[in-house]
Image (cartoon, rainbow, N blue to C red):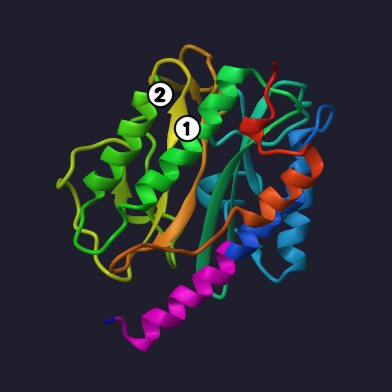
Amino acid sequence: MLNDKRREAIEIMRECNLLVSRTLAEVAAIIEPGVTTLELDRIAEKFIIDNGAEPGFKGYNGFPKTLCTSVNSQVVHGIPSDYVLKEGEIVSIDCGVRMRGYYGDTAYTFAVGEIDTRVAELLRTTYESLYRGIEQAVAGKRVGDIGYAVQLHAESAGFSVVREMVGHGIGENLHEDPEVPNYGKRGRGSLLKEGMVICIEPMINLGGRTIVQEADGWTIRTRDNKPSAHYELPVVVSKGSADILSTFEYIEEVLLTKNNGLPWQNRKP
């Protein structure tokens, strides 16, 4: 049974995370060939501040921007810049906010125009893997159950799972215990307890699972330079089923209107 203080904290985190989703929807509206990742960052930062929150990533361990914008083979932590998005690319956007002493954190991979069929399958499988993991975020299970579900779904489709980058707990700090790997064995790892808030965030590669860090000291990309996808949602571990603190609905309302479909539906013949 959660006490009143914990329930209050969870509702503040829900507000934070819904603001992150609304921010990503603002960004979704302008993603197209010819837009720079720096412009996406400017839109996001203004929206967050206008809504009474702080960018959660900017300044965190020295990270210089509001968003992480990771293009094609970049897995996570790409730094917004003058890079111009091109037709057929994908861009994973990770966003965090801080408000009333708590953090929110959500990520989504967007298609830039029409994308290759196999890349669309990568996006769909990574998205589905996230929800396979969320199904396991139940009190009494273990983080290994989450990782096993994500890994099984991704590898069954012929993709690979990044090992070095993982999900995490979240609350008054952006990153808290426990770590939530996207691979594992059922019944292993930290026990999931009612009221824990964790971010589940599969990072799935089209090619091999090996990653390298670029010279900027932040950006992580695939060693073979093949595309990678990333989706993330925060959930409260609960009895029976997880309570998802955020939503992709705001983002997908924009995408459905703008593109007449979701990224993995927007395929080349």
Tag of residue 217: none
Task: Label 2: state its secondary structure.
Answer: loop
Going by the numbered disc 2, the residue's amino acid type is Ala
Q: Nearer the viewer, residue 61 or 184?
A: 184
- Residue occupying image coordinates x 79% and y 50%: 43
Distance (Cα) linking label 1 and label 2: 7 Å
Asked whether the beta carbons under mark 1 and mark 2 sit within 8 Å of each other, the answer is: yes
Residues shaded magenta: 2-17
Residue 170 picture quarter = bottom left
Of the image marks 1 and 2, the number of the one nearer the N terminus: 1
Residue highlighted by disc 1: 125
Looking at the rendering, in which quadrant would you find the N terminus?
A: bottom left
Q: Residue furthest front?
A: 269
Q: Residues within 10 Å of mark 1 (few under 14, many from 20)?
A: many
Residue 241 picture quarter = bottom left
How many numbered discs sit on the rendered protein?
Answer: 2
- Residue occupying image coordinates x 57% and y 51%: 57
Residue 28 x/y as whole percent: 74, 45
Q: Is residue 227 magenta?
A: no
Residue highlighted by disc 2: 157
Residue 196 picture quarter = bottom left
Going by the numbered disc 1, the residue's amino acid type is Thr
